[in-house]
Image (cartoon, rainbow, N blue to C red):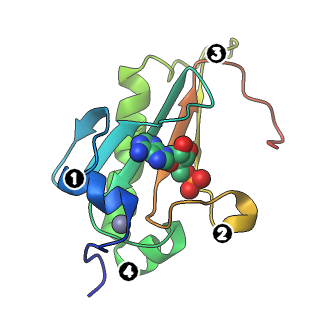
Amino acid sequence: MPGEPQADCLFCKIVAGEVPATVVRETETTVAFRDINPQAPTHILVIPKGHYADAATLAAEAPQLVADVLREAGTVAAEEKIAVRDGGPGTGYRVVFNTGTGAGQTVFHAHAHVLGGRGLNWPPG
Ligand code: AMP
Ligand code: ZN
């Protein structure tokens, strides 16, 4: 069944409370927690509670959850005060879905990285 927990999935274990995480927000369908290896002053992961391997799979199998994840990304950014749109350094934020090992995906449970609190280069590395 799409979305069913996977026994060997780290983020399913975080959803189940079997692996500790610094949770900053939770809804009926999502969890947001701090990345254990932050790449910016604010680096939060927003995940659907259900297991989907990546963002495209999530969009294909549970499109409403994509909206839930992106809404929560915006709420987290607002709460972290990185969502200000004045154009100065350290304002604004980036939402990233690494997809595939060649793009840096290491956990195959869909997750949005919410990054901010410093200047963010474009194009990204
Ligand atoms: P990705 O490489 O895009 O699949 O992102 C996976 C992210 O999960 C990485 O940024 C890791 O630092 C992060 N991560 C791995 N284990 C944990 C954990 N136990 N708690 C929080 N974040 C984690
Ligand atoms: Zn999972």
Q: Is residue 115 above or below residue 55?
A: above
Q: Residue furthest left?
A: 28
Q: Which numbered circle lies on residue 100?
A: 2
Disc with the residue nearer the chain's start (4 vs 2): 4
Quadrant (top left/top right/bottom left/bottom right) for the C terminus: top right
Question: Marks 4/2: CA distance?
Answer: 18 Å
Give amino acid for label 4: Glu
- For mark 3, does the 10 Å Cα neighbourhood hold few (<14), some (14 to 19), or many (20 or more) residues? some
Q: Is residue 112 visible?
A: yes
Query: Looking at the image, is mark 1 or mark 2 earlier in the sequence?
Result: 1
Separation of marks 1 and 4 at Cα, in angstroms: 26 Å
Secondary structure found at label 1: loop
Task: Assess whether mark 2 and mark 3 are in contact (beta carbons under 8 angstroms).
Answer: no
**Residue on which disc 3 sits:** 90
Which residue corresponds to the image point at 56% horizontal and 31% vertical from the top-left?
Answer: 38
What mark, if any, has residue 18 been given in the picture? Answer: 1
Judge depth for marks 4 and 2 and give the one in front: 2
Are circles 4 and 2 on residues that touch, CB within 8 Å? no
Please tell me whether residue 63 is drawn above or below residue 12 in the rendered image: below
Q: Which residue is mark 4?
A: 61
Q: Is residue 95 above or below residue 104?
A: above
User: Who is closer to the viewer here, 9 or 118?
Assistant: 9
For disc 4, does the CB lie below 8 Å from ligand 2? no
Whether label 3 lies within 8 Å of ligand 1 gets the answer no
